[in-house]
Amino acid sequence: MSGFAIEFVSASKSYGQTEALRQLSLSIPPGEIFALVGPNGAGKTTAIGLLTGLLAPTSGSVRIAGHDLASEAEKAKSVLGFVPDRPFLWPRWTPVETLRYVGAVFRLSGQDLSSRIEREISSFDLEHVRNRRNETLSHGTRQRVALAQAFLHDPLVYLLDEPMVGLDPIAQRHLVRRLREKTAEGATVLLTTHQLLLAEEVGERAGVLVGGRLLACGSPDQLAADESTRGRLSEVFFSLAGVPDERDGRAFPDF
């Protein structure tokens, strides 16, 4: 994949008189984990919605692997692995049936699909629930099924909206390991999170979105060195959000 994996070009999104995203310009190259952080209502989920084609920008454009979502939506979506902030699984299907359906959507079949399903069932520790209905699974287990769906077709771009919600520390660490393996192979990850330490420790770059505007962007070292954003990501975030940083100690597992 040449060029940028993810591109926002002066992208804005309004709902009536409310501007949820304002002139967002952001380019993410292949092989990078990018963390988008911001308070509730900052525009993070709207940005993800534009990248998936679930929302259309009011102005500007959005591209995935060079494909404009407005004119080449099918090509753009074919290279995406997406986990929304509230994943929906068909209640009466099992994890295996869910993955088989997703595989068919991405035109996988036969032994190739079966091998991929077994790979993800094993990777996300779903063997013991593989034939249980989704409606009987815990929130964390359903989240692992949703992640398995996103990895199944080996996409070029992973969009993960609050992916750690419901995952225990072991599952969190495993997910980070898988994402790092994928970016080492050239894939790209954009994740949104409220967990600042996750963004700081996992993201090679991070962006701070407040009120629909990208107020800071760069590697943790760049943010710490820049005169306008000096400090750790948590300090930058709270400063830009206009509230004091009263966090004491670490609250996220060491990756």
Image (cartoon, rainbow, N blue to C red):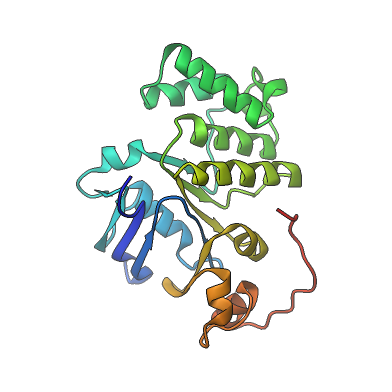
Position above or below: 209 against 102: below
Q: Position of residue 35 (x, y in %)?
A: 53, 60
Quadrant showing the N terminus: top left
Left or right of residue 28, residue 184 in this image: right
Q: Position of residue 95 (x, y in %)?
A: 59, 24
Viewer-nearest residue: 234 or 133:
234
The furthest residue to the left: 71
Residue 23 seen by the camera: yes
Q: Position of residue 31 (x, y in %)?
A: 46, 50
Left or right of residue 58, residue 236 in this image: right
Position above or below: 243 against 158: below
- Total marks drawn? 0
Position above or below: 48 against 20: above
Q: Residue at x 45, y 64 (%)?
A: 43
Q: Position of residue 81 (x, y in %)?
A: 45, 40
The furthest residue to the top: 110
Q: Residue at x 54, y 60 (%)?
A: 204
Q: Residue at x 67, y 41 (%)?
A: 174
Viewer-nearest residue: 7 or 210:
7
The furthest residue to the bottom: 227
Q: Residue at x 45, y 22 (%)?
A: 101
The furthest residue to the right: 249
